[in-house]
Amino acid sequence: MDPRRLDRDVAGAAAAHQGLLAMLDQQLSSGSFDGTSPSRLPGWTIGHVLTHLARNADSIVRVLAAAERGEIIDRYEGGQARRDAEIEAGAPRPAEELVADVRSTIWSLEQTWSTHTRWDGRSREAQGREVEVSELPFMRWREVEVHRADLALGYDASDWPAEYVRRDLRLMEMRWNARRPMGMTGLPQAALDAPPHERLAWLLGRSSIGDLEPAGVF
């Protein structure tokens, strides 16, 4: 574990949290915030996205608590089916309740980060793979930045912080290369010609670039 990288990831996620909460508070103060409005994700409302962000924070808190005990647990208790059911159940709540849930789970997560000591622990992800818990702050940073844009509330990929784009672009390009046949690595030229945030949005399945097929990585 690189403590300096961990510091940057925690700081990046915390800044993303504050940006998200400020945006949600502004929406609430407008008096027209409706959690049942569609998000940019097919089949998901704003309520689905916000509930997912809250339960995602809860899942990291669970894993870190287990890591402190020297245990490895499933990040989403009950697997994908229970995760999806909790999101569906929480999505129709009033806007004020949705935002309060996001806020309280952010506070809980950041407090847990501040006292966590076992960064050498591991988390079992929904797909069965294990990751080091030291990777979770960056994964959370990605969740907040990407889903904040998914909310379609005036925040887009072009607003993503340059440091986040730089870090995630490197990771997603590595995933792209790992899925290609041997000797056929490297992004298509059209993707390479696109601005970094557009390239990352394409790799994350959030946008298209010209006639390129979906990246199929995320």
Image (spheres, rainbow, N blue to C red):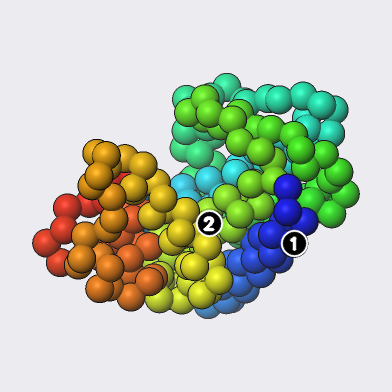
- What residue does disc 1 label? 4
Give the numbered dot on residue 136. none
The residue lying toward the viewer, choosing from 2 and 211, is 2
- What residue does disc 2 label? 142
* Front of the two marks 1 and 2: 1
The quadrant where residue 60 appears: top right
Q: Is residue 28 visible?
A: no
* 28 over 49 or under it: above or below: below
The quadrant where residue 16 appears: bottom right
Q: Amino acid at mark 1?
A: Arg
* 171 over 18 or under it: above or below: above
Image spot of residue 131 (x, y percent): 61, 36
Instruction: Report, in whole angstroms, how far the alpha carbon at label 1 lies from the one at label 2.
Output: 18 Å
* 17 over 93 or under it: above or below: below
Image spot of residue 154 (x, y percent): 42, 75
Considering only order in the chain, which callout, 2 or 1, is on the residue closer to the N terminus? Answer: 1
> Measuring 53% from the left and 66% from the top, which residue is drawn there?
164
Check disc 1 and report its element: helix, strand or loop. Answer: helix
The residue lying toward the viewer, choosing from 138 and 78, is 138
Q: Amino acid at mark 2?
A: Arg
